[in-house]
Image (cartoon, rainbow, N blue to C red):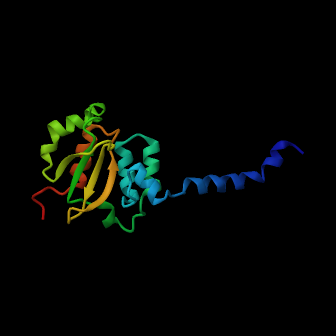
Amino acid sequence: MNSFNLALPLIPLLLILCFCEAEQKLSTKECEKLGFTGLALCSDCHTFAEYIKDQELVSDCLNCCAEDSDDATSKVIYSGAILEVCMRKLVFYPELVGFIEEEKDKFPTVRVQYAYNSPPKLIMLDEDGQLKDTIRVDNWKREHILQFLKEKVKPSTEI
């Protein structure tokens, strides 16, 4: 009997273990530590993947997202956003500095908030101005921030 025949029965078990590991969702606390509230829809994570090429970050998003219930909910639009950053760490994020200095005024419903030791993140707001979702933007380029805000934040003239 060769070793291939001995390993053959183990293959389905290994496939099941790999599949289960890939589908594992993170706890709410783990997601919050990563910058995700769990309110993001999984379709948003796929959109996110188009802008951010960091597979680990996209994987974290997918492990924290809520399944889409229908097409209408996959197009979540926020009423505003807060770009929260640590002023002392801002020097390490030239793309964010460029956005804040040159592009932020294009978005009247987006404001910048400085918080000590906070990782760069977009705090997405609902109609009542309450936190609806949090998205880390450490590795985002200026054009990615612009595109995301254009697609996901209501213009101030919209009711």
**Nearer to the camera, 31 or 69:** 31
Look at the picture and state if 97 lies above or below 80: above
Relative height, residue 135 to residue 103 (above, below): below
Q: Position of residue 99 (x, y in %)?
A: 20, 38
Residue in front for this viewpoint, 116 or 1: 116
The quarter of the picture where residue 86 lies is top left
Residue at the far bottom: name it: 69
Place of residue 123 in the rendered image (x, y in percent of width and height, measured from the top left): 28, 53
For this rendering, which residue is in front, 152 or 112?
112
Where's residue 136, x and y in %? 34, 47
Query: Is 20 situated left or right of 72 in this image?
Result: right
Seen as rendered, the residue at the extreme left is 157
Nearer to the camera, 30 or 70: 30
Q: Quadrant of the C terminus?
A: bottom left
Q: Residue furthest front?
A: 116
Tell me which corner region of the image, top left, top right, bottom left or bottom right, holds residue 133.
bottom left
25, above or below 93, in the image: below
Image check: 34 left or right of 102?
A: right
- Which residue, as the protein is rendered here, is positioned at the far right? 1
Q: Position of residue 40 (x, y in %)?
A: 36, 58
Q: How many marks?
A: 0
For residue 73, above or below residue 31:
below
Location of residue 64 by image quarter: bottom left
Could you tell me which residue is drawn at 29 percent across and 37 percent down? Answer: 141
Quarter of the image for the N terminus: give it. top right
